[in-house]
Every structure is written in structure tokens, then in C-alpha cells.
Amino acid sequence: MRLRTYFLTGMIIVAPIAITAYLTWSFILWVDGWVKPYIPLVYNPDYYLPFTVPGFGLLMALFLITLIGFLTANLVGRSVISVGEMLLDRMPLVRSLYKGLKQIFQTVLAEQSGSFKQAGLIQYPRQGLWSIVFIATETKGEVRERLPVGESMSVFLPTTPNPTSGFLLFVPSEDVLILDMSVEEAAKMVISAGLVSPDYPKILPIKSKPETRSTGN
């Protein structure tokens, strides 16, 4: 029993580290294999060194993405992007794919977006049963106008143990119970099927009380 306990304890420590290292290394090699063939030999350190430099392609990809973002932020860059989008807008199939992907990335990555900043509870799949949801935003557009309720929220209901799949639901705001836990903590709870739960109530820093000075007579 002691050996079994030691083994399970070791697995809890080693398995997450090993899986994280494996996935990280696989991602670095995948980006390197995709980017390095397009790097001129003059700028590729693998051409000068007797060994390959892992991660150089990833660094170049991050640099190019940041450079494109910098160029797009000015007037010339916006003009070039506008011309490119006008050309894509004339391609029937590519147009729909590009607009859909652009809207998704703008919603997820834009700093002004409040997507997935809160976790909550709704009664699903029936009254009396509660499920964790990720709150995306207030319902907008035609869906909001067509719903026979007042204010509503667009929420994402993840599935267990894979939170990347789920359902998009439009729920009345009064039916959503906002949680104090973060989205990351809620995702861990979903992935572990409730086995991993954050501490509650959260320990808040104690504020020091201002010192009171006694006045002498």
C-alpha cells in the first residue's frame, strides 16, 4: 500500500510536467518545421552551426506577427489591409471563411472584449440541475431583438472532460448566477468532472486599520 501511494504521488507530480513539456516541445518543433523553410539561409543559424537551434522559427514567427500588427496600426498598413480585404470580398468561398475566422479572433483576442472573463451557473438541462458556463457577452443583434425576454447573455456551456466543445446558449440575465471563481478555475473543475474545486471563500488580503492617536488632556 505504501508503494502504491508513493507511485500515485509520483504520477501526480511527474505526469503533468511530462505532458506539458512534451506538448510544448512538439509545438516548438511544429512551428520550426513550418517557418524555417521560408527563412533565408543568411539569417538561419542552422546554416552556420553544426546543430539545429530549436525555437528559432517560433521566435521569427512571433517577430513577424508583431511586425505585421505594428504596420497595421498606422495609416499605410490599414490601407493595405483594406485593399486585401476588398480582394478577398470578391471571392465567394474564401470571403465567408475569412470573415468568420476574423470575427472569431477579434472576439477572443481583442483587448476591449469581455469574452470569457467570468464563469457562472445556469439551470441546465432542466430546472434543478446546474451547469457551469463561461459568460461571453450580452446578447446582441437580431438574436437579442427576437428573444421574447429582456436582457440576456450569450454563454458557452462546455462539456466534460473536453471544455473546447459545448453549446452556445442565450440565457436571460436573471437566470445566470455569476461565480467568484475565475474562468481557469471553472475550466479545471469541468475537465476534472468536479474532482478539482477551488477554495471558497477566497482569502482576501487583510487591510491594516489606520492607527488612532489618543489626545492627551
Image (cartoon, rainbow, N blue to C red):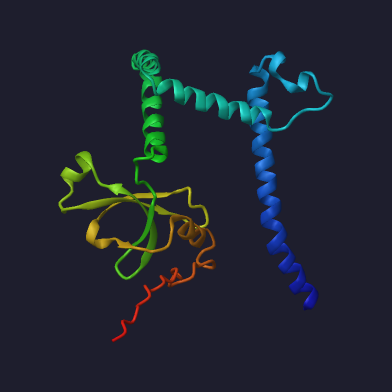
Above-or-below relation of 117 to 52: below
Q: Nearer the viewer, residue 209 or 16?
A: 209
User: Left or right: where does residue 62 sit relative to residue 138?
Assistant: right
Q: x%, y% of residue 78?
A: 37, 18
Q: Nearer the viewer, residue 125 or 110?
A: 110
Q: x%, y% of residue 41?
A: 72, 14
User: Left or right: where does residue 144 sit relative to residue 167?
Assistant: left
Q: Nearer the viewer, residue 192 or 66?
A: 66
Question: Exactly how many numbered labels are in the figure?
Answer: 0
Quadrant of image for the C terminus: bottom left
The residue sitting at 45% across, 72% down in the picture is 200
Q: x%, y% of residue 99?
A: 36, 27
Q: x%, y% of residue 18?
A: 71, 52
The residue sitting at 45% across, 26% down in the picture is 69
The residue sitting at 66% across, 56% down in the picture is 16
Outermost residue, bottom side: 217
Above-or-below relation of 65 to 213: above
Quadrant of image for the N terminus: bottom right
Q: Quadrant of residue 108?
A: top left
The residue sitting at 46% across, 71% down in the picture is 203
Outermost residue, front side: 217
Q: Quadrant of residue 92?
A: top left
